[in-house]
Image (cartoon, rainbow, N blue to C red):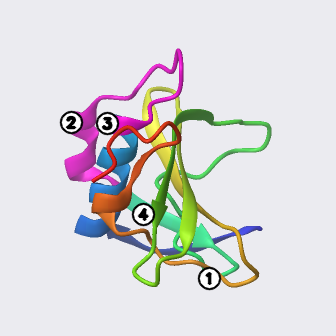
Amino acid sequence: MGRSPIAVRAISAEERAVLERALQYAPADGADLPSLDQLDSLQVVGKCQCGCASVDFQHLKSGEIADVVADAIGETRAGERVGIIVFALGGNFQGLEIVGYSDNPVPLPVPSTVRGWDGQGAA
């Protein structure tokens, strides 16, 4: 899906919690993780046009490709399983992608359910 620019806002507490757990329990092998000090000042600058909870922290320029720094799974409040991918570019967090497996746009997962695909971090 495409991205829509939005009025810039601070990262929400729930977005931050999902991001932190994904980084803690499912960092990508060999990924160069950005400093977690950035989390306090992250700004959301875009969102997915499909209506899901995916957000961008910086816009990609033509030809830029962000790196996957975490790849996790979790469940929404309705019990739907979702994928969580954290992207970074140039040492900065670029985006938080929430991947649904149905035809409906998905909300953020419950932060406490975010874990690695291997089950690490499961409550």
For the point 23% across and 66% down, which residue is it? 13
10 Å crowding of disc 4: few (<14), some (14-19), many (20+): many
Type of amino acid at the residue the image marks with label 1:
Gly
- Give the SS element for disc 4: strand
Q: Nearer the viewer, mark 3 or mark 2?
A: 3
The Cα atoms of the two marked residues, 3 and 4, are separated by 21 Å
Q: Which residue is mark 4?
A: 44
Q: Which secondary structure is most common in the magenta stretch?
A: loop
Say if mark 4 contacts mark 2, CB within 8 Å.
no
10 Å crowding of disc 1: few (<14), some (14-19), many (20+): few
Dot 3 or dot 4: first in sequence order is: 3
Q: Which residue is mark 2?
A: 37
Residue 91 image-quadrant placement: top left
Type of amino acid at the residue the image marks with label 4:
Val
Stretch of the chain drawn in magenta: 25-42
Q: Position of residue 34 (x, y in %)?
A: 38, 29
Using the image, tell me which numbered label, if any, was put on residue 24: 3
Magenta segment includes 36: yes
The Cα atoms of the two marked residues, 1 and 4, are separated by 15 Å
- Give the SS element for disc 2: helix
